[in-house]
Image (cartoon, grey):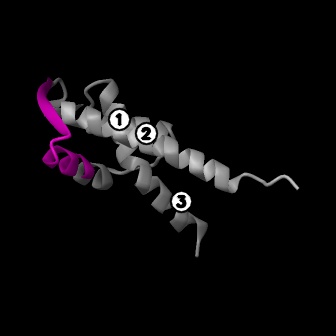
Amino acid sequence: MKIENARAQMRKGVLELCVLSIISKEEAYPSDIIKKLKEAKLIVVEGTLYPLLNRLKNAELLHYNWRESTSGPPRKYYYLTEEGQEFLGGLKETWKELTQAVNLSTKKQKV
């Protein structure tokens, strides 16, 4: 088993949490989301992000507004619905519990 595969799976597991967190701060255009994820060292391509955004929209966790663009056609800006905000709160609580469990289980035992 290669470490790169394990890293990729771990990143995929937290991507939904990260994307929803970014959008919760302000309405976001997909390329802005990708930029923020890259800044956080979570490399994501459009082919990964767009299906995720669509799935979250279909689950009614996200909606979008169309905004005119100075450099082309109108753009979709995503924002969290009330249900999306509640869902994000649950994900954050789950993440907190998970990180505590991982930290405890990987902590060196005193002899």
Q: Position of residue 41 (x, y in %)?
A: 52, 43
Q: Nearer the viewer, mark 3 or mark 1?
A: 1
The label on residue 7 is: 3
Q: Nearer the viewer, mark 2 or mark 3?
A: 2
Q: Secondary structure at mark 2?
A: helix
Quadrant of the rendering where the N terminus is positioned: bottom right
Q: Residue furthest right?
A: 111
| Stretch of the chain drawn in magenta | 52-68
Residue at the spot of label 1 = 89
Q: Secondary structure at mark 1?
A: helix
Q: Is residue 73 visible?
A: no
Name the residue located 23 percent from the left edge and 54 percent from the top edge: 51
Name the residue located 88 percent from the left edge and 56 percent from the top edge: 111
Residue 110 vs 82, above or below: the answer is below
Q: Residues within 10 Å of mark 2 (few under 14, many from 20)?
A: few
C-beta proximity under 8 Å, tags 1 and 2: yes
Q: Nearer the viewer, residue 90 or 32?
A: 90
The label on residue 93 is: 2
CA separation in Å, label 3 and label 1? 25 Å
